[in-house]
Amino acid sequence: MAEITAGMVKELRTATDAPMMDCKKALVESDGDMEKATAWLKERGIAQSAKKADRVAAEGLAGYKIADDFSKATVVEINSETDFVAQNDGFKNLVQDTVTEIYNNNPADVDALMGSSFGSKFTEAVTKIGEKIVVRRFATLTADANTALNGYIHSNNRIAVIVVAKCDSPKTAEGMRATLKQIAMHASAMKPTTLSYKDFDAAYVESETIGRIEAIKKENEELSRLKKPLINVPQYISMCQLTEEVLANAEAAIKAELKAQGKPEQIWDKIVPGQLARFIDDNTTLDKEQALLDQTYVLNDKLTVAEAVTEAAKALGGTAEITNFVRLEVGEGIEKKVDDFAAEVAAQMS
């Protein structure tokens, strides 16, 4: 009897897209022969999804489940090839079953989920529906007594969000749940990719700086042609670039400009803070676009999300700070294949 190694199981799974447990069984039945194991899977309809392995699954649905006491929440993204299949009741039930399985059993990752007995549900779905169907990603967040947790799934079931905030007391945590639901809705619409500007990689910020400044310059060329007001061209794009030296130089430049304009020095303290805030605002566009805490809050454009959370907690007599969030949007980042229908027909006729 041949020894069945983890590497053999992985190789067969890669080749057939069949669940790990089925791959192991096929290898055992075939005494480690890869070709016979593949045939064994195909005979049972388990390897039919292998024909679909190179297709792009960028449609689908998100799943969302939250505890009645707001102590735990799970989100999952399951992809199909077409939106038509995503609207199928069988597919919707598969999404709900999957998010419940993840919520209840906490698999370590997608491979662990698909390698469990639950993975056979996907084999059955692929065989029945005839499309590639995959679990792309999932996440579960939890909360203790001093942690507020809430989430949101958009009405189209394609975007799901969970938000967690550390609070000073159980009372504040309970009171903050409604605010976190609103923050989750904000994140659904505004598409943050990270929690704070502090999370950005320096090389990423540097490359983005060059591109964004050039884009603004090009936009200004068009605005100039149309005789419309120009956009301020920033020097920077993130708070992580605004060192104490940069801010000190910006303040000095503002004061020099006020002096050149003949503004009395005794009123500078009323003007400088506002202009410095404008400088920071102009030079943190990346943060406002991608970092949740630094985004302008959709329900109050005078506050950032971080400030809105602080204000809400203060109204409850406590403190709160968002420490984590998860946002899944179906198909996000997946490059969809564009089919050339005429070429496909011509190829079939040749």
Image (cartoon, helix red, strand yellow):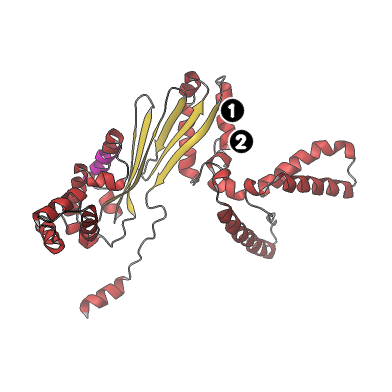
- Position of the C terminus, as image quadrant, is bottom left
Q: Considering only vertical position in the picture, is 245 above or below 182? A: below
Queried whether the magenta region covers residue 83, the answer comes back as: no
Residue 8 relative to residue 252: left or right: left
Image point (63%, 64%), residue name = 218
Residue 91 appears in view: no
Q: Amino acid at mark 2?
A: Leu
Q: Whole-percent x and y of residue 159? A: 39, 44
Magenta-drawn segment = 90-99
Residue 267 appears in view: yes
What is the tally of numbered marks visible in this picture?
2
Queried whether the magenta region covers residue 92, the answer comes back as: yes
- Position of the N terminus, as image quadrant, is bottom left
Residue 163 relative to residue 83: left or right: right
Q: Whole-percent x and y of residue 172? A: 50, 21
Q: Which residue is mark 1?
A: 311
Front-most of residues 250 and 33: 33
Q: Considering only vertical position in the picture, is 50 above or below 143? A: below
Q: Considering only vertical position in the picture, is 82 above or below 291? A: below
Q: Amino acid at mark 1?
A: Glu
Work out whether mark 1 precedes mark 2 in sequence or the reverse, and give the earlier one: 2
- Secondary structure of residue under mark 2: loop
Tag 1 and tag 2, C-beta contact below 8 Å: yes
Distance from the alpha carbon under mark 1 to that under mark 2? 9 Å
Q: Main secondary structure of the magenta part?
A: helix
Front-most of residues 311 and 86: 311
Q: Which residue is mark 2?
A: 303
